[in-house]
Image (cartoon, rainbow, N blue to C red):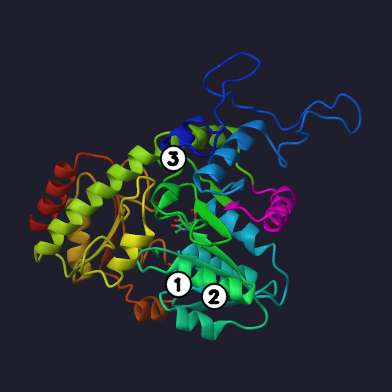
C-alpha cells in the first residue's frame, strides 16, 4: 500500500486487507501454533508461530508504517521488547539509559542485564553534555524515554541522534508516552523505537504487549533472531486486538491529549496542587522542545495525556485519590478510561528512594492518565475530590 497516505488512512488500511480466502473485511485471527508444510523445506511463509504468524505479521506491518519505519516486531510486553533490544548486545557493552526511565526498565537493567555482563549507566538525558561525557569506547546503545515516566522530562531526540551517529552508537527511544501518533523518533534520527503497546497501541487496558520498530536492516536482523530464539511473542488474539485498536489511535490520542492540556491549564491557575507538571504548559522548562518535537501527523504540537501533580503531602494525596470517582487507582496508562497512580509506591517501587528523591520523584506525586471521557466531567471530578 502507498506509504504516502496520511497516518489515519494507513492506520486503518495497512495490515488490514480483506482476507483472500473468505473476503472477510475484518482480518482472521490465526489461532495456530504451527503450519502445514507441503514437503520438507516448503511452506507458505510460516512454519511455527514463535517465528511468525499471519495475524502478528499484519500488526507488525501496521506498526512499522505508523512509526515511519521499515521493520516492526511485536512482543509479549513492553519489557519483553526492551529486553530483546538489550539481548542484541554482548557482555562488556556499555548502555547509557535515561535516569528517570520507567521503574521496570530500571529494574531489568540493574537486576538482570548487569548480571549478564552489560554495563548500564543512568544519565540525565535532558542534557546532551552529560550524555557526551558518559560515552565510552564500549558504548553501544543509548536508551531514552521522552517524555519520562512520571516526571515528564524531555530528551532532544534530534540532538542525541546526531551524537549517536558521530559515535556509531544505536539510539533507541521509548515512545510509549507519546504513541506513534504524537511523536516520530525515527524521523528525528533515532535508530529504534520501542513501545509498551499495553498503553496507547492497545488503548483499552485489556492486553499486555510491546513493539520495536527500526529501518536499519542489520538491527532488524538481530532483533528478528532474538524474537524467534527467545520467544517472548504476543498471542494471535492480542495481535488482532492491537490491529483493531490502532485504527482509532489518532482519535483516541488526540482527545486524551486535548483533555490533559485543558485540565492542566486550569489546575495550574488554581492553588489546589503544589505543582502541575505537563509539557504543554509554558511553565514547563522544556515547553519549547515539546512544541517542536511532539507533533502529530497534521503538524500540530501535541503534549500527551499524562499529567503529574504534587499534592503537598501523603495525607492530601490519599484523601484526593479516595474521593475521585472517575479516575481509577491503577498502574498503567494510555487506555480510554482515566487512571491515577502513585509512581513512588507503584510503577517506580523498584527504584531506591534516594534515587527517586534526587530526581524530584516524591511520594506526594500522583500521575494522571487522561482517557477519552467528557473533559468537563473529569475536571469536576478532580475539583470536587480536592476540595471536598
Ligand atoms: C514508559 C514505559 N516503558 C515501558 C513499560 C513496560 O511495558 P509493559 O508493562 O508493557 O511491559 C512501561 C510500563 O508501564 C512504561 O510506562
- Tell which circle, 1 or 2, labels the residue nearer the N-terminal end: 2
Residue 228 falls inside the magenta stretch:
yes
Residue in the image at 69% along x and 29% along y = 32
Q: Main secondary structure of the magenta part?
A: helix
Answer yes or no: is residue 103 visible: yes
- Element on which disc 2 rests: helix
Among the 4 quarters of the image, the one containing residue 118: bottom right
Could you tell me residue 206's position as x and y percent? 44, 39
- Tell which circle, 3 or 1, labels the residue nearer the N-terminal end: 3
For disc 1, the neighbor class at 10 Å (few under 14, some 14 to 19, many from 20) is: some
Against 57, residue 92 (above or below) is: below
How far apart marks 3 and 1 lie (CA) works out to 37 Å
Numbered circle sitting on residue 7: 3
Q: Which residues are drawn in magenta? A: 213-232
Residue in the image at 29% along x and 46% along y = 256
Quarter of the image with the N terminus in it: top right
Amino acid at each position: 500500500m502507498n506509504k504516502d497516505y496520511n497516518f489515519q488512512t494507513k492506520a486503518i488500511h495497512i495490515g488490514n486487507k480483506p482476507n483472500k480466502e473468505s473476503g472477510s473485511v475484518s482480518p482472521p485471527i490465526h489461532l495456530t501454533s504451527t503450519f502445514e508444510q507441503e514437503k520438507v523445506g516448503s511452506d507458505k511463509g510460516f512454519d511455527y508461530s514463535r517465528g511468525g504468524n499471519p495475524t502478528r505479521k499484519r500488526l507488525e506491518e501496521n506498526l512499522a508504517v505508523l512509526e515511519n519505519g521499515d521493520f516492526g516486531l511485536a512482543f509479549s510486553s513492553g519489557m519483553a521488547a526492551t529486553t530483546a533490544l538489550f539481548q542484541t548486545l554482548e557482555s562488556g557493552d556499555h548502555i547509557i539509559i535515561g535516569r528517570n526511565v520507567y521503574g521496570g526498565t530500571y529494574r531489568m537493567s540493574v537486576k538482570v542485564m548487569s548480571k549478564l555482563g552489560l554495563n548500564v549507566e543512568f544519565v540525565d538525558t535532558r542534557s546532551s553534555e552529560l550524555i557526551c561525557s558518559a560515552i565510552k569506547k564500549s558504548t553501544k546503545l543509548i536508551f531514552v524515554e521522552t517524555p519520562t515516566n512520571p516526571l515528564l522530562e524531555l530528551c532532544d531526540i534530534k540532538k542525541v541522534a546526531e551524537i549517536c551517529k558521530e559515535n556509531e552508537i544505536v539510539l533507541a527511544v521509548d515512545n510509549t508516552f507519546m504513541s506513534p501518533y504524537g511523536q516520530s523518533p525515527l524521523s528525528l534520527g533515532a535508530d529504534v523505537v520501542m513501545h509498551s503497546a499495553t498503553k496507547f497501541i492497545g488503548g483499552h487496558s485489556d492486553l499486555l504487549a510491546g513493539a520495536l520498530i527500526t529501518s536499519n536492516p542489520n538491527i532488524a536482523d538481530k532483533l528478528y533472531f532474538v524474537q524467534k530464539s527467545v520467544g517472548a511473542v504476543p498471542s494471535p488474539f492480542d495481535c488482532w486486538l492491537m490491529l483493531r485498536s490502532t485504527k482509532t489511535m489518532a482519535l483516541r490520542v488526540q482527545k486524551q491529549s486535548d483533555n490533559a492540556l485543558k485540565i492542566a491549564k486550569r489546575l495550574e491557575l488554581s492553588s489546589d496542587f503544589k505543582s502541575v507538571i505537563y509539557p504543554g504548559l509554558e511553565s514547563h522548562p522544556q515547553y519549547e522542545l515539546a512544541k517542536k518535537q511532539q507533533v502529530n501527523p497534521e503538524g500540530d504540537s501535541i503534549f500527551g495525556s499524562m499529567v503529574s501533580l504534587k499534592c503537598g503531602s501523603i495525607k492530601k494525596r490519599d484523601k484526593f485519590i479516595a474521593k475521585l470517582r472517575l479516575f481509577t487507582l491503577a498502574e498503567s496508562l494510555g487506555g480510554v478510561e482515566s487512571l491515577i497512580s502513585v509512581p513512588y509506591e507503584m510503577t517506580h517501587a523498584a527504584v531506591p528512594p534516594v534515587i527517586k528523591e534526587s530526581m524530584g520523584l516524591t511520594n506526594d506525586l500522583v500521575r494522571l492518565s487522561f482517557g477519552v471521557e467528557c473533559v468537563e466531567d473529569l475536571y469536576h471530578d478532580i475539583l470536587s475530590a480536592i476540595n471536598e
